[in-house]
Image: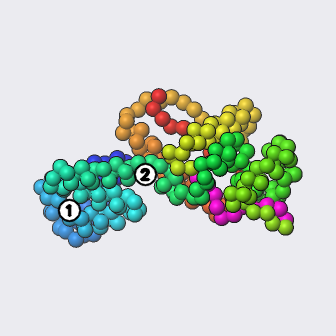
Amino acid sequence: MESIFEFTDYKSVLSEFLASHEKSWGIKSKLATSLGIHSAHLSQVLSQQKHLTLEQVERLARFMGLDEFETEYLMTLHQENRAGTQELKSHFKRKMDRMIKDHRDISKRYGEKKALSEKDQVLYYAHWLYAALHMAIAIPGNNNPKVLAQYFRVSENKVHEVLQFLQATGLVKKTTTGFELTNLWVRLPRDSPVMTQHHYNLRYKALESVSRDSQEDLHYSGYYTFSNSDFAQIRELWYQTIRKMQEMVAPSPSEGLFAVSLDFFHV
């Protein structure tokens, strides 16, 4: 089933969900029971003869296992579909458009962290070393300037310059044994003026990795042709992959510094 945010009719969500679970025995009967209605009533909803109530749509969301944000979108979609005036429909449509935009904004989907000032953002993303060194400090043994300079093959003076900035912004702190991360970290909002530079920095490092031709690194590029609906589903697949990756690395011990760079777009 495609992302809930690709739908413009709540009944289509219902139909697609049942179709994607058609091999699950008794799924329609179980859903009707969960909604508190008879199977015959559910059939009338599917055939466009009746509507679900807002309360039943909320139960549908729970039955589908939707998260809070997805549930809110489905309920707003139901309200837009059932609105009695064009003005009210437009109101809910604008709300849905904002939710779709937020859904596609990684920083809002997974939590926007420390907000650097615009001046600090420009410096932090001016060169790849700032973000990379910031993360590398989490690796055991990488907590002093000399080791960091060797790790990144840059001068100790440059490392001191970066560390001074990271301290000033509260992203790292100095201890008796070296430097360590604070509980703050940075994620750019999608409309940040330095987003382009941030992506450029990662692509630059990716090209360096390609030139090394390491058997451990993974690089893949290619052109495909497929439908617009498949594009939406594949994009959602990557969103889910990013979320799973975040959940996986959160408790993972810091043993190495890795870079992730993903491009998926219309040509």
Rounded to the nearest whole Å, what is the CA distance between mark 1 and mark 2? 27 Å
Q: Which mark is residue 52?
A: 1
Element under disc 1: loop
Give the class, few, some or many, for how many residues have Cα within 10 Å of label 1's Cα (few <14, many ≥20): many
221 lies above or below 112: above
Seen in the image, is 161 located left or right of residue 252?
right
249 lies above or below 105: below
Q: How many numbered markers are drawn?
A: 2
**Label 2, on which residue?**
102
Asked which quadrant contains residue 259, the reply is top right
Would you say residue 184 sits in the magenta stretch?
Answer: yes
**Pick the front one: 154 or 19:** 154
Give residue 151's position: percent from left, percent from top. Answer: 82, 47
Seen in the image, is 239 located left or right of residue 65?
right
**Pick the front one: 238 or 73:** 73
Q: What stretch is highlighted in magenta?
A: 177-187
Is any atom of residue 256 visible in this view?
no
Q: Which amino acid does label 1 sit on?
A: Leu
Q: Which amino acid does label 2 sit on?
A: Asp
Q: Residue 174 carries which label?
A: none
Q: Which colour scheme is used?
A: rainbow
Give residue 162's position: percent from left, percent from top. Answer: 76, 49
Q: Which residue is drawn at 64% across and 61% down?
A: 184
Is the magenta region chiefly helix, strand or loop? loop
Q: Residue at x 26, y 53 (%)?
A: 91
Q: Which residue is drawn at 18% across and 55% down?
A: 83
Is any atom of residue 82 visible in this view?
yes
Give residue 249's position: percent from left, percent from top. Answer: 63, 58
